Amino acid sequence: MLLVVFVLWQHKIQREERIAQSLQHQLALEQLSLLNAEIEEIRAGFIGIGQRVIALEQQQLSFSSQLAEVMEMQSQITEQQQKIDMFDPDSKLYNRAMKMVQLGAPLEEVMRECELPRAEAELLYNLHKT
């Protein structure tokens, strides 16, 4: 009789241990599932960040090429302006008049030295007076 009670008691203990192990296993599976979901969220976030970085790099390349084009056009315009200034005797007079105005020369002197009409001299004077 004692042996039967002992065997039943052992069986009960083993069953309780299996139930406890099963519960622990179930809890571990739930935690694993939660961790997998979190990892998937993080992975999706990294993918989104990577896509944004790629888009920004493409924009930066586009802006760089546009800047190079603008600088090239500016260089061409400056070169053309210099060519025009070399062949346009009137522009030399205007440049001289502008420098005189910036240095503080009176209006009458600018008109006389650069042979400009009063209206043009006044316009230059109003535009470039410091």
Image: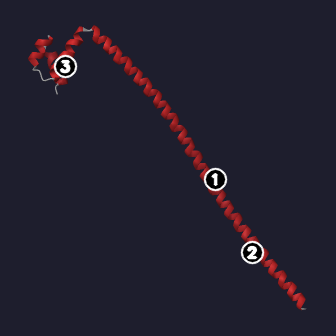
- Per the image, the residue denoted by label 2 is 20
Mark 3 vs 2: CB contact within 8 A: no
- Direction from residue 100 to residue 31 in the image, left or right: right
Question: Would you place residue 4 above or below residue 83 in this image?
Answer: below
Residue placed furthest toward the front: 103
Residue positioned 69% across, 64% down in the render: 30
**Amino acid at pointer 2:** Ala
How crowded is the residue under tag 2: few (<14 C-alpha within 10 Å), some, or many (20+)?
few
Q: Earlier in the sequence, mark 2 or mark 1?
A: 2
* Structural distance between the alpha carbons of marks 2 and 1: 30 Å
How crowded is the residue under tag 1: few (<14 C-alpha within 10 Å), some, or many (20+)?
few
Question: Would you place residue 79 above or below residue 22 in this image?
Answer: above
Could you tell me residue 43's position as x and y percent?
Answer: 61, 50
Q: Earlier in the sequence, mark 3 or mark 2?
A: 2
- Direction from residue 64 to residue 36 in the image, left or right: right
- Per the image, the residue denoted by label 3 is 98
**Amino acid at pointer 1:** Glu
- Per the image, the residue denoted by label 1 is 40
- Direction from residue 74 to residue 62 in the image, left or right: right
Disc marking residue 87 = none
